Image: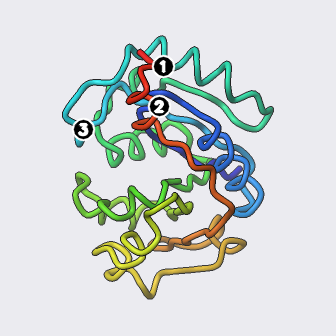
Amino acid sequence: MVVGLLGGSFDPPHAGHVHISLEALKRFRLDRVWWLVSPGNPLKPRPPAPLPARLAEARRLMRHPRVVVTDIEARLGTRFTAETLAALRARYPGVRFVWLMGADNLAQFHRWDRWQGIMRTVPVGVLARPGAGLRSRTSPAARIYARARVGAADLAAARPPAWCFLNLPMVDLSSTAIRATGRWR
């Protein structure tokens, strides 16, 4: 089984998350996608809305039989993606994981804790986000791992380091913009 992991604050979850999850399922040939609704993001200055509220909204929004919304990071007690991946791989040894991220995250991936270890541990699927294309494709991570870039259909079976940048029709939504309207929290 191949499971795509879409980690994030989901503060709030929105149709863009749904869109990239469904595209990742199809284009990366994944069996499942797990939304890892994180307790918090160490790179963000403000804490997110309470985890139960974000989980409830994510579950209300994402209703697909092959997508699971989970708070497993909170239950595992992991704070960083590298820790979460290590714990999940130990807990589910028969599962092949693929890390999923928006292009905006690839642009600053080099700031993540043990980011190169993540690249060497699992294939990484990068999904286009409005305004992040050039920044992400010229990021330190993209430059360092340029030779590890593979096609979408090959990503799930690729041996790490392997990554794919997936251009797709975009949904122009962001959690930051939604919070700015005051419609969330």
Front residue (pair 60, 98): 60
The answer to whether the residue labelled 2 contacts the one labelled 1, judged by CB atoms less than 8 Å apart, is: yes
Which element is circle 1 on? loop
Q: Where is residue 39? Give x, y as percent.
A: 36, 24
Please give left or right for residue 48 compared with residue 182 in the image: left
Furthest toward the right, the residue is 65
Front residue (pair 31, 61): 61
The three-letter amino acid code for the residue at tag 2 is Ile
Circle 1 is placed at which residue position?
183
Foreground tag (2 vs 3) = 2
Circle 3 is placed at which residue position?
44
The CA span between labels 2 and 1 is 6 Å
Of the 4 image quadrants, the one containing the C terminus is top left
Which element is circle 3 on? loop
**What's the residue at 26%, 54% (across, down)?**
112
Front residue (pair 36, 184): 184
Circle 2 is placed at which residue position?
178
The CA span between labels 1 and 3 is 20 Å
Which element is circle 2 on? helix
The three-letter amino acid code for the residue at tag 1 is Arg
Above or below, 30 relative to 47: below
Q: Where is residue 132? Give x, y as percent.
A: 43, 64
Foreground tag (1 vs 3) = 1
Q: Where is residue 20? Give x, y as percent.
A: 64, 50
**What's the residue at 41%, 58% (across, down)?**
104
